Amino acid sequence: MYGLYNGFNEAAAKAYAADLSGGVHLGTYFGFYNSVIGVFALPASIIAGLLWMAFGAPSVFIYGTLTALIAFALLLVAPAVLARYEKRQNEVMGSLIDYKAKDSGNKR
């Protein structure tokens, strides 16, 4: 049963990461996605174990619920944050191209 859940969940998460990338720097997005998963998996397990030992099983489920709600909220704002970042990056690149064009025009 866990295999089915994990197959659907991982496929959906990777598809969402691909959608967020917009097809640009897809490898970077997948690398960042997998890095975040790897970095947070160990501390999450340690925290869950400590909560279980200190407060019992219900505390772990409450912790899981709260972190899932936080993740959901972050997923809602991620497209807006990425769009703002992309817009700023395009502005910087555009001004850099304009600067180079102006600079090369002065050398002639």
Image (cartoon, grey):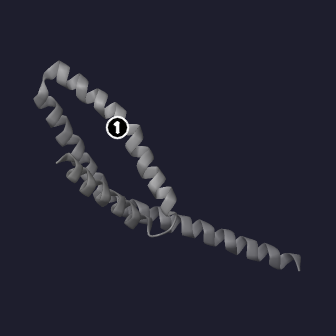
* Residue nearest the observer in this picture, 85 or 25: 25
Q: State the residue at coordinates (50%, 68%).
A: 24
Q: Residue type at mark 1: give it.
A: Ala
* Residue 41 placement (x, y as % from top left): 34, 37
Q: Which residue is mark 1?
A: 41
Residue 50: image location, x then y, percent: 24, 22
Question: Which quadrant holds residue 35?
Answer: top left
The total number of labels drawn is 1
The image quarter in which residue 45 lies: top left
What x and y, as percent, mark residue 28?
A: 51, 57
Q: Residue furthest left?
A: 58
Bin the neighbour count of mark 1 within 10 Å (Cα to Cα): few under 14, some 14-19, many 20 and up: few
Q: Is residue 38 left or right of residue 1?
A: right
* Of 86 and 102, the residue lying toward us: 86
37 shown above or below 45: below
Q: Secondary structure at mark 1?
A: helix
Q: Quadrant of residue 64?
A: top left
Is 37 drawn above or below residue 75 in the view shown? Answer: above
> Which residue lies most toward the top here?
54
